[in-house]
Image (cartoon, grey):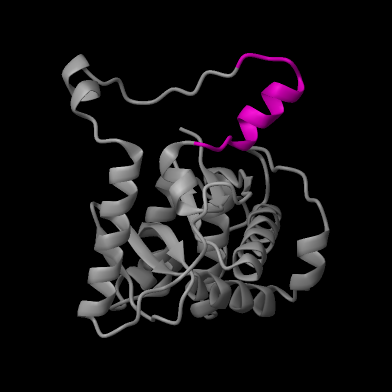
Amino acid sequence: MAFDVYVGPLSRYIAGDWKTLGQQMAEQQGLKFVKVTPKEGLLSKWLKPKPEKVYRDLREAIRNSLQAAGFSDPIWDDSPERDYVTDRPGWEGLVAFVAQYAYARNPELTPPAKALSMPELAEDPAFEAELEKDGSPVEVIMSTRFFLPGTFSYAFNVGGHGVAPIDLLDRALTTVCDFCSLDRQQLIQTPIDQVDEDATFAEATLYGTAIYARLVHEALAQNLPLIHDY
């Protein structure tokens, strides 16, 4: 299952009016791209709510959850004609970025030599240490799908999906870049090739961190949601 990150209007994402990096690359090469998703029965398809209703319900649930916790509703431009950007860190990029964040928060532990897989992350000592901490931002990042603009400092769940402020990713990037002596602005401007299965932990960290640096920068600059798509 692929893992992409989308930055753009929430309404456009819900409507499916966007293309993953894989779809874009296939189009450029004149190839047919087939996106595999869980099968739905005819009844499920018939009863499936329209994207406009899904968007309205999600937006209302976000607003209600934040107001109930004493936070103001985050505002962004959800015009469907607004452009979007996307990239594919893959699970390896996400896992490396999150694991490195865990090691930055637990510097007494030694990072692995080889890049971690998702199953290996669950057993990684730094990640396990974070799971034991109440409200760990490392755990929140892994369980969040919608990162939203705004001044709220509150992570919550809506319709089975985690919601958190983009500021959480912004602070994680600062911590990882400081810990690894990485220039965040240089990362934003420097293309980095995708890592393979034999990548070192440091290589995978650089790859994942560079993608998140670019996309978080775009989300903050444009005041748009950042969404984990899988």
Which residues make up the magenta segment? 17-32
Q: Residue at x 45, y 32 (%)?
A: 1
* Residue 158 figure quarter: bottom left
The quadrant in which the C terminus is found is top left
How far across and how far down the image is residue 168, in percent? 48, 74
Confirm whether the magenta stretch covers residue 22.
Answer: yes
Q: Is residue 112 above or below residue 39?
A: below
Confirm whether the magenta stretch covers residue 47.
Answer: no
Q: Is residue 93 left or right of residue 160?
A: right
Q: How many marks?
A: 0
Q: Residue at x 82, y 61 (%)?
A: 189
* Residue 27 figure quarter: top right
Q: Residue at x 25, y 78 (%)?
A: 67
Is 102 in front, or is 192? 192
How far across and how far down the image is residue 59, in percent? 32, 59
How far across and how far down the image is residue 84, in percent? 62, 49
Is 24 in front, or is 84? 84
Q: Is residue 52 above or below residue 143?
A: above
Q: Is residue 185 left or right of residue 112?
A: right
Q: Residue at x 45, y 71 (%)?
A: 75
How far across and how far down the image is residue 176, in percent? 62, 73
